[in-house]
Amino acid sequence: MKAPQDIILRPVITEQSMDTLPTGKYTFEVAKTANKLEIANAVEQLFNVQVTKVNTLNVRGRSKRVGRYLGTTASWKKAVVTVNPEPTPGKDGKKRKGTIEFFDNMF
């Protein structure tokens, strides 16, 4: 089993991802081998929230040119995680949060 820090690599901060924050959708770059269940469990453990839905997509690397040399950027996997704004208590009885605090000051 992977650690949650190995699954969730970084948040994706773009205009489009910031527009979806009020609806409870958060965007992350995740490990390419992670599935939806692993992503949901990792977000719940790291941020103490209740995940209702996970959408994933593979982002292809783009072609880049530097002078006469042609190369590609790395491909990666993106996950859009929907969080329940009014969560129920967790399995351990602790109260969960309705938002991810890291993103609260961004919109």
Image (cartoon, helix red, strand yellow):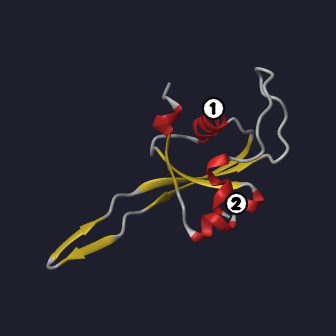
- Does 91 sit left or right of 46 as displayed? right
Q: Which mark is residue 45?
A: 1
Q: Position of residue 67 (x, y in %)?
A: 16, 79
Residue in the picture at 74% in, 55% down: 24
Q: Amino acid at mark 2?
A: Leu
Residue type, numbered disc 1: Gln
Q: Residue furthest top?
A: 92
Sequence-first tag of 1 and 2: 2
Tell me the element at label 2. helix
Q: Are marks 1 and 2 in contact (CB under 8 Å)?
A: no
The residue shown at (48%, 53%) is 77
Residue at the image position 34 percent from the left and 58 percent from the top:
74
Number of residue marks? 2
Determine which residue is flagged by label 2.
Answer: 21
Q: Is residue 78 above or below residue 60?
A: above
Instruction: Single out the residue that lies furthest toward the left.
Output: 68
Q: Quadrant of residue 38?
A: top right
Q: Left or right of 59: which side holds 86? A: right
Q: In the rendered image, which quarter contains the C terminus? A: bottom right
Secondary structure type for disc 1: helix
Disc 1 versus disc 2: distance between alpha carbons?
A: 20 Å
Name, please, the residue furthest toward the bottom: 67
The picture places residue 98, in percent across and down from the top left corner, at 78, 45
